[in-house]
Image: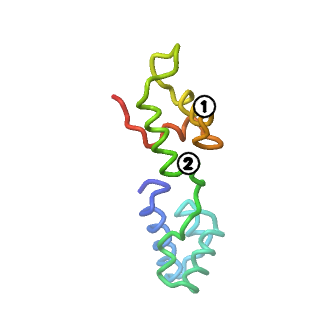
């Protein structure tokens, strides 16, 4: 199971609960699962409060979206238009700069400018 995948986190939590039920010390469980002792303690506490719901992740806020759907459509349309004079094609940095210049959004990073655009192979 790969680190960071939902199934991996669920597996670790479930394994910790089973081992706790068998009487294994939290420190030993933490070492076996490559997590901190406080994580095992937290899972045990959550299990007492929430039951098996602890196996699923709580919603995460994540990074805020930089642009909405309307702005994304404008950036996509811009990418489909002719590039600025002196350029043979759009780069992500050019797209981001032009989108801000045209007031599509207040700020746009080049990585966000590329999200949602079709990949050319």
Residue 76 figure quarter = top left
From the top left corner, tell me how far across and down residue 49 is, in percent: 58, 86
- Foreground of the two, 32 or 103: 103
Query: Which residue is identified by label 1?
Result: 97
Q: Secondary structure at mark 2?
A: loop
From the top left corner, tell me how far across and down residue 120 is, in percent: 36, 30
> Label 2: few (<14), some or many (≥20) within 10 Å?
some
- Foreground of the two, 54 or 84: 84
Please, which colouring scheme is shown?
A: rainbow
Query: Which residue is identified by label 2?
Result: 67
> Label 1: few (<14), some or many (≥20) within 10 Å?
some
For marks 2 and 1, give the CA distance. 14 Å
Farthest left residue? 121
Marks 2/1 in contact by CB < 8 Å: the verdict is: no
From the top left corner, tell me how far across and down residue 26 is, in percent: 60, 73
Q: Is residue 33 above or below residue 83?
A: below
Q: Can you say which quadrant of the picture contains the C terminus?
A: top left
């Amino acid at each position: 199971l790969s680190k960071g995948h939902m199934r991996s986190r669920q597996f670790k939590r479930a394994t910790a609960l089973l081992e706790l039920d068998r009487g294994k010390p939290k420190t030993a469980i933490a070492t076996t699962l490559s997590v901190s002792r406080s994580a095992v303690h937290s899972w045990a506490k959550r299990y007492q409060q929430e039951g098996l719901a602890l196996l699923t992740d709580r919603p995460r806020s994540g990074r805020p979206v930089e642009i909405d759907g309307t702005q994304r459509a404008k950036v996509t349309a811009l990418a489909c238009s002719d590039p600025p004079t002196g350029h043979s094609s759009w780069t992500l940095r050019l797209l981001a700069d032009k989108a801000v210049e045209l007031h599509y959004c207040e700020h746009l990073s080049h990585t966000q400018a590329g999200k949602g655009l079709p990949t050319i192979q």
